[in-house]
Amino acid sequence: MNPADSNSTSVPLLRNQNLIPNRRQPTQWKHLAKPCLILIAILVLSAPVAYSLSELIMVARHKSPAVSNLIELLIPSSKTSRTTTKTNDSTMTKLVQKSDENFSPPAAFCGKRIVGYFAEFENTALTRKQLRMLTHIVFLFAFPKNGTITFGGESSSQKFEEMRRNVRKASSTLKVMISIGGQYNSGEFSGLVSNETSRNLFVNSIATFVRDYDIDGVDIFWTWPKHSDENNYLMFIRELRYAFTELQKKLNRKETFVISLVISRNVNHLSKLVEFSNFVDFINIYSFNSYLYQVGPDSPLYGGGSRNVDEIMKYYICKTGQPSKFNIIVSFHATYWEGAELPLRDDSDDIFKDQNSAKGGFAVRWRELLQQKWDMSNIKFHNLTKTSYMWIPGPPTRFMTLEDEKSLREKNRYVADHNIGGITMWTIDQDDGDHTLLKVVSSAELCTGDRRNEIKYKCD
Ligand SMILES: *[C@@H]1O[C@H](CO)[C@@H](O)[C@H](O)[C@H]1NC(C)=O
Ligand SMILES: *[C@@H]1O[C@H](CO)[C@@H](O)[C@H](O)[C@H]1NC(C)=O
Ligand SMILES: *[C@@H]1O[C@H](CO)[C@@H](O)[C@H](O)[C@H]1NC(C)=O
Ligand SMILES: CC(=O)N[C@H]1CO[C@H](CO)[C@@H](O)[C@@H]1O
C-alpha cells in the first residue's frame, strides 16, 4: 500500500464498496435542484464511510508490523517434512510430494479452481492446511507505477515473498499468482495499454516480475476499463499471453503461465468476452453488490431482478459458451448497516432498500464476528436469495449480510450445477483460525465428468 494512498485503499480492500462501475456517481447529485442539499447529502453519506475508513486504516496500520509472523505456522511443519525427507531416500521424497498432492481440493482433479486471495492488508498467518485446500493463491496487490510492476511498500513485498517461498515448500501443485491493480491502483492501466510502446513496457515488466519472483501467473484487476479502453485492453492481454508463451519456452517450463482477469458484475463492462477468454485461463466475476446507496444482500443467488448472481452468470456464460472459464468471487467478510429497514422479506422479490439515513455499510471480517460479540445464533437464511443475514430489531436496527457455511454451500451447489469453473475467496485471511469458510468452499464437488462444459442456462 502506498502510504499516500492509504486513506483510500483500506476500505475497498476489505469491502470494495466503490468497485462497481456505472452506479450512481456523486456527480449525478448535480441533478438535484438545490446545491445546498448536495452538500448536506454528501456530508451525511460520507460520515459512515469516513468512520469505517479510519477504523480500517488503524487495523491495517497497526497490524502490518506483525507481517513477519506471517508464515510462522508454516515454517515449523515445512521443516519437519524437509528433515524427514532428507533422512530418507528419494522414494520418500516422492511419497511426501504425493501425499501433499492428495490434499488438493476435490475440484483440482478435473482442472477446476479453488482460488484464495491473500491480502497485503490482512494479518493472519498462512497455514499448510489452508494451502492444501486451494488450487491457486493470489496475492493482493502489486500495481504499475510508471509502467513498472511495483509493491505498495517494503512490508508488502516481504509478505509476498514469504508467501511464495512457503507455498513452494508446502505444495508442488498450488499455483502462486499476483494480482495487478485494484481499485486505487488502476489509474495507469488506460494510458499504459493505449499505445504499443507503453504496452510493451508494461508487458515486459509483468513477464520480468513473473520470472524474477518465480511465480505461476498474474491476475489483472483493472477497475474498471471504459468502453474506449476495451480494444487496447484486449491487445494488452494478447501480447501478455504471447510474452508468457515466449518466457515459458525460454525457461523450458512445462506448464503455461496463468492469466486471470477480474471483471465486474456489471454486464456492460466488457463486450469482447469471447476474445478475452481465448487468451486467459479464467475470469473472476466480482459478484458483490456495491451498496453505495442501498442496503441488501451481498451476493444474492436469486431475487432482486437482474442484480443477482444467477442473472450475471447466465449473461457471461451464454455470451462466451464457456462456463468453466469463470469463477465466482465470494466474500469472507460481512457488511452491516445501523438504522436501516429490513430489506429481505420472504414474500417479496424486492430485496434492496434505499439506505436513506441508515449508517454503513460497515465491514466485519468473519473471524471478527465473535470478537465483536455478534450473536451468531441470530443468523437466518433467506430462501429466495439463498443468502444468510442477521436482523437485530434494535433500536437501532441492524441488518447484516454475510456468507456463512449454509450460504456458501448453496453457492458450491450452484457452481457445480452450472458447470462453473470455480470459486474465488476474498480473502482467505479473513476466515477464522479453523478455516471454517474455506473448508466449505474447498469441499465443493465441481467435477461433473465429461459434461463439464455443458451450458446449463436457457440462453436467448
Ligand atoms: C518513468 O519511466 C521512464 C522510462 O522508463 C523514465 O524515463 C522516467 O524517468 C520515469 N519517471 C519516473 C517518475 O520514475
Ligand atoms: C504512449 O502512452 C504513454 C502512457 O500513457 C505515454 O506516456 C506516451 O507518450 C505514449 N506514446 C505515444 C507514442 O503515443
Ligand atoms: C425454498 O425455495 C425453494 C426454491 O428455490 C423451494 O422449492 C422451497 O420450497 C423453499 N423452501 C421454503 C421453506 O420456503
Ligand atoms: C521409509 C523410511 O525410511 N522412513 C524413515 C524416514 O526417516 C524417519 C526418521 O527421520 C524414520 O523414522 C522412518 O522410518
Image: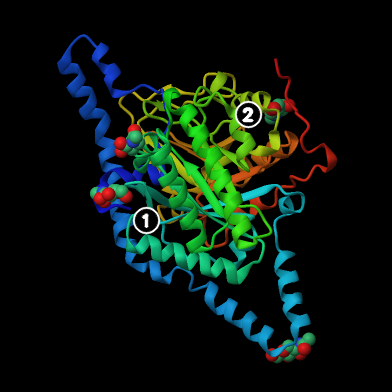
Q: Amino acid at mark 2?
A: Val
Task: Let me know if residue 369 appears in the view.
Answer: no
> What residue does disc 1 label?
151
In the rendering, at what x and y percent does residue 1 appear? Answer: 33, 53
In the rendering, at what x and y percent does residue 134 appear? Answer: 63, 56
Question: Where on the picture, by quarter, is residue 19?
Answer: top left
The quadrant the C terminus occupies is top right
Q: Provide the secondary structure element on which disc 2 rests.
A: helix
Total label count? 2
> What residue does disc 2 label?
274
In the rendering, at what x and y percent does residue 176 appear? Answer: 56, 58
Q: Amino acid at mark 1?
A: Phe
When the figure is inspected, residue 316 is found, relative to residue 279, above or below; the finding is above
Q: Residue furthest top?
A: 33
When the figure is inspected, residue 180 is found, relative to residue 230, above or below; the finding is below
Task: Let me know if residue 152 appears in the view.
Answer: yes
- Distance, label 1 to label 2, CA atoms, is 31 Å
Which residue appears at 74% of the width and 45% of the height? 446
Q: Residues within 10 Å of mark 1 (few under 14, many from 20)?
A: many
Q: Badges 1 and 2: C-beta atoms under 8 Å apart?
A: no
The mark nearer the N terminus, 1 or 2, is: 1
Question: Where on the picture, by quarter, is residue 175?
Answer: bottom right
Query: Would residue 238 appear left or right of 35 to someone viewing this image?
Result: right
Q: How is the image coloured?
A: rainbow
Which residue appears at 76% of the width and 53% of the height? 109
Query: Would residue 251 appear left or right of 38 to someone viewing this image?
Result: right
Query: Would residue 52 appear left or right of 348 to someone viewing this image?
Result: left
